[in-house]
Every structure is written in structure tokens, then in C-alpha cells.
Image (cartoon, helix red, strand yellow):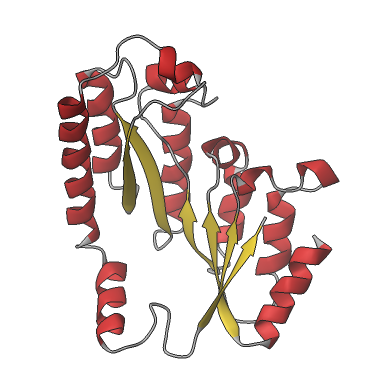
Amino acid sequence: LECVLEEFKTGLQKGYSSFALIGTDIGDYGKDRGSDLLELLTTLVQMPEHFHLRLRNVNPRWIIRAGAEFCDLLRSGKIVYMESPIQSASNRILQLMRRGYRAEDFLDAIHRIKSVCPSLFIKTQIIVGFPGESDEDFRKSLDSYRSGMFDYVDVFRYSDRPNTDASILPGKLPQDLIMSRYRKLFFKSLFQLNYRPIFHDIISRRRRGTTAMGEDEKHLYIAG
């Protein structure tokens, strides 16, 4: 915690006003040192300086577990962006993926978060074409995005990776079906983003030759 805070304070002194906490799964932060992500975020948002904070790659398990406390932190207005990958809205597929959570629990947590902080930009990830994914499984993922709780989705096409359990699962889907599902979700996501106010703000600032957060703002990424 002390190392992160030192880097954060150094960034503030150098004029940075946009910070990102990044890692493979920052929801696991601090478990090896008797701390956790809530402690870190609480310490950061209580700092009096003006800044924005982005959370990159938070596992849905953490969102479900720490939802109430996290909502309290969002009221500070300093956390403006979060990435959390649902991967699929089908519990059957999530179980095959060994993700360790139920889709409805994660979506309920996101709904509570949005009710507390509607301006929070939430990006998720969905994998299409996982072995055994049915039309109904895909429809559930599509519906989860149509719900409007996510501002953007990164869509990935499933492909075998060597020495993984998924690579030997039955029910592999043909590539043309995977591509069809990919395109359907990708273009819906892109279309929806085009109507988000934050999207037009980013575009207008870039056309003026400024950054997304303001002309004089700098960005600092702190790896976990």
C-alpha cells in the first residue's frame, strides 16, 4: 500500500490528474499482504486533491462480494471508469469456463452500482463461441448488454489455446457461426457507444487536439 501511495502522490506532484489501477485482476490486490482493494481505494478517494481514477480488470467475483462498500466509495465522484469482464451471461457457460460466479449476481451488483453512480463508465468483455454455446446462451449474453448496464463491451471470439481444458471440450462451434455472433454483438456495442455522451466528449476534444479528460491533464497508470 505504501508503494502505491508513494507513486500516486508523486504523480499528483507532477501534475497528473487521471490515474489507472491496472493488473491481471486488481480485485485480488493485497491478499498476500493482509490488505485488499477496498482499503486501497478508500485511502485514495479520501485524498483532497482533484483527480479521476480508472479501475482496469476487476473480476466480477470482487464486484459481487464488495458491492455495498464499493458503492459507498463511488459517492466520492473520483472513480469514473471500471472494467469488469462478465465473459458470458449464461450460467451454464460460466460454469464450463470455471468463472466462479453466477451471471445474475454480477448483473444485480452492476445494477446497484449504476443506481448509485449513473455516470460511472463500465466496460465489460464477452467471449462468443465458447464450446457448447447454444443460441439461448448467446441470447442471454446479448440481452445482458441490451439491458444498458454496460457502456461498452469488448467482444472476443473463442479460439483453442494449447493445454487448456477448454481446448478438449466437445461442442466446438463452426467459425462462420462464431463470426456471425461476434459481428452482431460488436456492432450493437459500437452503435450504443455512439450515443453515450462520454463518446461525443472524447471525439470533440480529440478534434480540438486535446485529451479526453482536459487540455492540461496527464494520465498515470499504476500497475498492481
Q: Tell me if residue 47 comes above or below residue 89 in the rendering.
A: below
- The part of the image, by quadrant, that contains residue 10 is bottom right
Q: Position of residue 38 (x, y in %)?
A: 69, 52
Q: Nearer the viewer, residue 131 or 106?
A: 131
Q: In the drawing, does residue 220 fall left or right of residue 146?
A: right
| Residue drawn 32% across the image and 88% down it | 209
**Residue at 35% of width from left, 37% of height from top?**
126
Image height check: is 121 above or below 162?
below
Residue 148, percent from left and from top: 28, 47
The C terminus appears in which quarter of the rendering? bottom right
Q: Residue at x 60, y 40 (%)?
A: 62
Q: Residue furthest top?
A: 170
Give x and y (percent) for residue 99: 51, 26
Residue 106 visible to an observer of this rendering: yes
Identify the residue at the far front of this view: 162
Q: Nearer the viewer, residue 61 or 166?
A: 166
Judge by depth and name the residue closer to the eye, 80 or 167: 167
Is 161 rendered above or below residue 172? Answer: below
Q: Specify whether residue 34 is in view.
A: no
Q: Position of residue 223 (x, y in %)?
A: 64, 59
